[in-house]
Image (cartoon, rainbow, N blue to C red):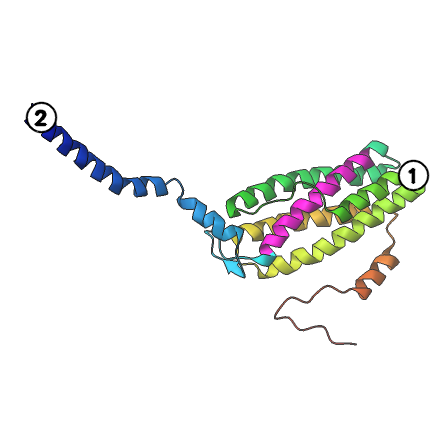
Amino acid sequence: MRRSIVTMFMVLAIVGTIGSLAYPVFYSYPHRFDAVKAAIADPGPAVNTPWGPLTVADRDLVVRVELEGLWEIPAGRQAVKLAPTKAIKEAGDHLVAGHTDLDKRVRSVAADLAIALPTQPTAEQQGWLAELSAAQGDDYRREFANLLRDEHGRIFQALAQVRSSTRNTLVRELATATNRTELDHISVLEKTGYVDFDAIAHEATASPAAIPTGFPAPSSP
């Protein structure tokens, strides 16, 4: 009996030793990606990912694409509902369809790169939606066309800069898809006949887009 008890304690001791050695290995394996996610979530200047380096500009672009959809989809739905003209309705349809597709893309990219996405429009974007809701008739048509066209022009320039410099495959593919969508939206908004090109040109001159690093500013004529 005494020998059996001693043997049992020896077996338990051996099992305990093996378990203590194996525990860190088995525990860390399911959580091995947590460290990678944490590093990507707080990248500093840049962080390596399986798809290439991820910079702050890359992250900002992913977040901005999501933000665009958060207010442009409601704006598009409102335009379709009001449908003051066929061209306005068409523009609204394109906004909803385009950003619904981009929303799926950006969520997939953000999940892979561990980027936290916003869940509601910014205060400025909410203000734009409020302006559209308060406008009526011809004022609404003009407000809708110019507000959306102006914002699309700004992100179109930002997309070109990031697309030309990013070394991250996922961000490059998202920028390419977003670029196509934004250009389509710019085209249908301009077809409404309500875009004030003089005002857009004046604003672009007052606050020109930043020149990408490595490219000289154009010389004066």
* 190 lies above or below 134: below
In the image, which disc is placed on residue 154? Answer: none
Tell me where residue 167 appears, x and y as whole percent: 53, 58
Q: Residue at x 64, y 44 (%)?
A: 118
Callout 2: SS: helix
Say left or right for 220 vs 161.
right
Dot 2 amino acid type? Ser
Which class describes the residues within 10 Å of circle 2: few (<14), some (14-19), or many (20+)? Answer: few
In the image, which disc is placed on residue 136? Answer: 1
Q: Is residue 190 visible?
A: no
Tell me where residue 192 appears, x and y as whole percent: 85, 45
Say left or right for 136 vs 102.
right
Q: Residue at x 48, y 49 (%)?
A: 38
- Quadrant for residue 211, please give it: bottom right
Residue that numbered label 2 is attached to: 4
The quadrant the N terminus occupies is top left
Q: Which residues are the magenta region?
A: 58-80
